[in-house]
Image (tube, rainbow, N blue to C red):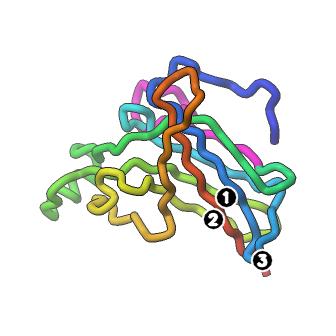
Amino acid sequence: MFATEPPQRPEEGGDPLFFFGSVKSTGGKPIAGVELDLWHADADGLYSNIHPNIPDWNLRGCFQTDEQGNFEVKTILPPPYEIPKNGPTGMVLTAIGTPHFFRPAHLHIKVRHPDYEEMTSQLYFRGGIYVEDDVANAVRDGLFTSLEPRSGEAQQPAYQARYDFVLKAKR
């Protein structure tokens, strides 16, 4: 669904990130109308609907691919963040003697289309801190994108990252 005037929060902290790519079938055919549901932490490593004092649905949104299966969204670059030590996950990590509580910077994403298998994943930035030592042990080959500087933006620094998704048709 395309919104002519989507809501924006110009005061949102963090460096701009332009996340773009394509969605294709396993046969290489571009898929139009795929819904991408994206969410991530804010510039302080906090999530809306989880942490207090963060606006509801902040840095969460859905968008669709165009007729050629392409997408682009402007957001902010999420940072690595520490899992709260006083929460249930933090207490378990403390009990098992985890040396640190950090997650690497990442984007959460769901990719869905009625004719294809839904995909839910996290994407990480190649070379980022904690990708080799993620406390959640969730980093896998194939889930990396390269973070590149994006020139020509009024607000610097700005970055771009590309990821191309492949969906399997439903049986």
Q: Which residue has dot 2 on it?
A: 119
The answer to which quarter of the image holds residue 42 is: top left
Q: Residue at x 51, y 26 (%)?
A: 55
Q: Which residue has dot 1 on it?
A: 111
**Distance (Cα) linking label 2 and label 3:** 17 Å
Q: Residue at x 46, y 29 (%)?
A: 157
Q: Nearer the viewer, residue 147 or 10?
A: 147
Callout 2: SS: strand
Q: Which residues are magenta?
A: 47-64
Queried whether the magenta region covers residue 51, the answer comes back as yes
Residue situated furthest front in the rendering: 151
Residue 132 in the figure: left or right of residue 91: right
- Within 10 angstroms of label 3, few (less than 14), some, or many (20 or more) residues? few
Residue situated furthest bottom in the rendering: 171
Residue 10 in the figure: left or right of residue 146: right
Residue 152 in the figure: left or right of residue 72: left
Quarter of the image with the N terminus in it: top right
Q: Which residue has dot 3 on it?
A: 27
Callout 1: SS: strand
Callout 3: SS: loop
Q: Nearer the viewer, residue 88 or 20?
A: 20
Q: Residue at x 51, y 56 (%)?
A: 145
> Amino acid type of disc 1?
Val
Q: Earlier in the sequence, mark 1 or mark 2?
A: 1
Residue 26 in the figure: left or right of residue 162: right
How many numbered marks are there?
3
Q: Earlier in the sequence, mark 2 or mark 3?
A: 3
Please, what is the dominant secondary structure of the magenta stretch? loop
